[in-house]
Amino acid sequence: LTDKAIDYIKEADSNNEPFFMYLSYTAPHHPMHAKESDLARVQHVPIKSGKKGDWRRIYCAMVQNMDDNIGRVLATLDELKIEENTLVVFLSDNGGPKEHNGSNNYPLKGKKGNLWEGGIRVPFGVSWKGKIPAGQVSDTPVISLDLLPTFAAISGADQLGEIKTDGINLMPLLTRQVNDLDERTFFWRRGGKKQAGLRDGKYKYYKTRGNGNEYLFEIGNDLSENNNLIDQYPEVADRMRKRYLKWESTLPELKIGLGAPASKEGENSEKH
């Protein structure tokens, strides 16, 4: 994948063409396999007993390999002297499926396939040499839906006509033109409508429709989602519940077969 990515970048550069590249590595992911050379570099990771005892070490070796190859891509940008003309974004599509590949979402609750923070809160890093100040960390919530309007803004595509998206351009925040963004509401739906999630300001509402369980968290002070406030603040829960249903009413109906069924705990099956 990296070899093809580098070839693509070099070809675009040789033709003096702008480019967009979406590079999705298949690791770290199940099936669990890693190069012996990478495994040798993570010998410090302990092996636990049991059938899946070595998965953590294999997972770490796969991450090591991914890091090396991202490094090769970044080195190519440097070699071609186009670092200052290239925005690089790194993010995961979901949290780790802990029991399937040795990942660890601590201190977040949950995993891939559910709407606990361990399933939806992911690494998100952005780099643009000379444009985005290095080393900054922001607590402002953003979502991957923001990438399209951000790319449209920096490429000039948003000047070709009105582009309507559910995201916003992040460049003012990333370049420190503003210190924060206007407060937004984030919505999630998972498992064929079996799971509903909403973040509004400091609160997060989560319902597993299979068993009817409802949760309310003050997420800024309870990242691990240990303190359910659903009974303590019923008016907040009711407001967020109604807002979610209003949003959901605007969505098209799901077609049969889309969305894995949720288990009793509201977590999706890993079988697709």
Image (tube, grey):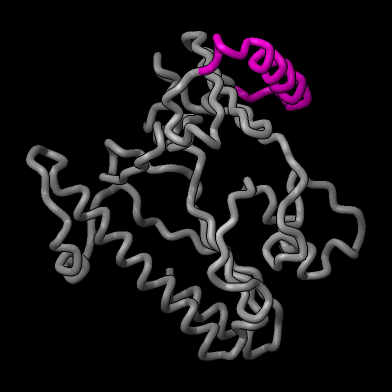
Quarter of the C terminus within the rendering: top left
What percent of the width, then of the height, locates residue 31? 28, 48
Quarter of the rendering containing residue 49: top left
Q: Considering only vertical position in the picture, is 128 above or below 144?
A: below
Name the side, left or right, on which 252 lies relative to 128.
Answer: right
Q: Considering only vertical position in the picture, is 203 above or below 54?
A: above
Q: Considering only vertical position in the picture, is 254 above or below 209?
A: below
Quarter of the rendering containing residue 173: bottom right
Residue 250 part of the magenta segment: yes
Q: Considering only vertical position in the picture, is 94 above or below 252?
A: below
Q: Residue furthest right?
A: 161
User: Which residue shows up at 61% across the image and 79% down it?
Assistant: 129
What percent of the width, then of the height, locates residue 148? 71, 55
Query: Is residue 36 in view from this perspective?
Result: yes
User: Which residue shows up at 58% across the image and 70% down it?
Assistant: 127
Q: Nearer the viewer, residue 136 or 248?
A: 136
User: Which residue shows up at 49% across the image and 78% down it?
Assistant: 74
Name the side, left or right, on which 40 lies relative to 66.
Answer: left
Quarter of the N terminus within the rendering: bottom left
What percent of the width, then of the height, locates residue 93? 50, 48
Query: Is residue 150 in view from this perspective?
Result: no
User: Which residue shows up at 35% across the image and 41% down it?
Assistant: 106
What percent of the width, then of the height, locates residue 184? 73, 39
Q: Residue furthest left?
A: 49
Q: Which residues are magenta?
A: 229-256
Q: Nearer the viewer, residue 218 or 109?
A: 218
Residue 75 part of the magenta segment: no
Q: How many marks?
A: 0
